[in-house]
Image (cartoon, rainbow, N blue to C red):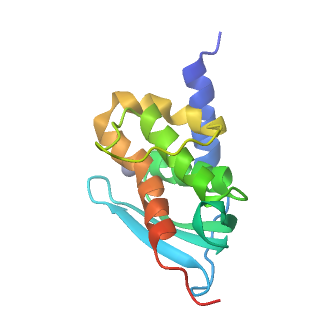
């Protein structure tokens, strides 16, 4: 009987082999941020086309480029698919849910977003919680996303 771990491995490999939302967006108007995980050599650049301001702004488009291990690149692919079309508030809530899943404690005093979000395929990455070194690979795309969200909106 194929176990859940086999299913998760299939999902991870699928996103690694056929990454979603691969590419770049012109900057400006897109926001972007670059992330690097020196422990593994993973590199990820996140491009965001955000319409509006504040938590209700909508992520109209997202593109990801970079290279690295299967965990980092599949996490980036899943992240891009999960946040596209969502609001900035929902995207931040997803970041938090993902951290929670891989066992990262929220910073003391951190404001926890309270949006109803579904991890979907991202649940396939929950196994990395057992491997502290891989957690950095899995979270790279998410911290790069946060940086891109926090970067000043370009003139449009
Ligand atoms: Zn890695």
Residue 50 percent location from the top left of the image: 64, 71
With 40 as the anchor, is 84 left or right in this view? right
24 to the left or right of 103: right
Q: Can residue 18 be spotted in the picture? A: no
Q: Quadrant of the rendered structure where residue 22 is?
A: bottom right
Image spot of residue 67 (x, y percent): 46, 62
Q: In this view, does 111 lie above or below 124?
A: below
In front of the other: 77 or 61? 61
- Residue at 49% x, 61% y: name it: 145
Identify which residue is drawn at 67% across, 73% down.
52
Q: Which residue extends farthest bottom?
A: 155
- At 53% from the left and 52% from the top, the residue drawn is 92
From this viewpoint, is residue 52 visible? yes
Q: Where does residue 141 sit, x and y in percent of width and height? A: 47, 56
Asked which quadrant contains residue 59, the reply is: bottom right
Q: Quadrant of the C terminus?
A: bottom right
Q: Looking at the picture, how far across and down is residue 152, in whole percent?
A: 48, 79
Return the residue nearer the eye: 118 or 108: 108
């Amino acid at each position: 009987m194929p176990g859940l771990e086999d299913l998760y491995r299939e999902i991870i490999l699928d996103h690694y082999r056929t990454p979603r939302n691969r590419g770049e967006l012109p900057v400006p108007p897109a926001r972007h941020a670059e992330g690097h995980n020196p422990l593994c050599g993973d590199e990820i650049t996140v491009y965001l086309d955000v319409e509006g301001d504040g938590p209700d702004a909508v992520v109209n488009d997202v593109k990801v480029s970079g290279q690295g291990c299967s965990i980092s690149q599949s996490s980036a692919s899943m992240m891009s698919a999960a946040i596209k079309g969502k609001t900035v508030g929902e995207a931040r809530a997803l970041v938090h849910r993902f951290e929670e899943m891989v066992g990262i404690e929220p910073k003391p005093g951190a404001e926890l977003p309270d949006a109803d979000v579904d991890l979907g395929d991202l649940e396939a990455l929950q196994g990395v919680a057992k491997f502290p070194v891989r957690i950095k690979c899995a979270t790279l795309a998410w911290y790069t996303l946060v940086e891109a969200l926090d970067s000043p909106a370009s003139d449009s």
